[in-house]
Image: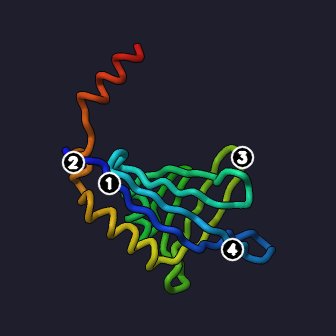
Amino acid sequence: MSTSSTVTAELGIRLVVPQQAVVPLLASLQYTTADPYAIRVSFHVGLDEPVVWIFARELLSEGMTGRTGAGDVRVWPSATAGVLEIELSSPFGQAHFEAPLDEVASFLDRTYRISPAGQEGMHIDVEAALADLLGHL
């Protein structure tokens, strides 16, 4: 098991609003080996606090080369070169974003350098998690 490491990136993305102009936004991506299977994306939409979504790193990675996702998060490479499409849905609505493919790829590459695919479990302290769980019962 290793100590926690974190990778972050700030991206200029676009919110695609049907029949309106595209809205530029800032998104912060974060990966930490403390939660090695997940990517946290914070969308800065002009509120006091960003809107945060957490989804699988594998889902984002697979979406770089083909359409993936069957639930609240869908990701796919755009027909427009250099663009990654990200679609999010919840009971409160749906949002479609366009992100720079090369910047997302660079971010993912850095996450895989600190935690290679298939080795995420090495960062999880199962005994501590179990003790924490049992302490809450």
| Residue designated by label 2 | 2
Of discs 4 and 3, which sits in the foreground? Answer: 4
Secondary structure at badge 4 equals strand
Of discs 2 and 3, which sits in the foreground? Answer: 2
Residues under numbered marks 2 and 4 in contact, where contact means CB atoms less than 8 Å apart = no
- N-terminal of the pair, mark 2 or mark 4, is 2
Amino acid type at mark 4: Pro
| Residue designated by label 1 | 5
Distance between the alpha carbons at the discs numbered 2 and 4: 38 Å
Distance between the alpha carbons at the discs numbered 2 and 1: 9 Å
Q: Which numbered dot is residue 24? A: 4
Distance between the alpha carbons at the discs numbered 1 and 4: 30 Å
Distance between the alpha carbons at the discs numbered 3 and 1: 33 Å
Secondary structure at badge 1 equals loop
Q: Is residue 65 visible?
A: no
- N-terminal of the pair, mark 4 or mark 3, is 4
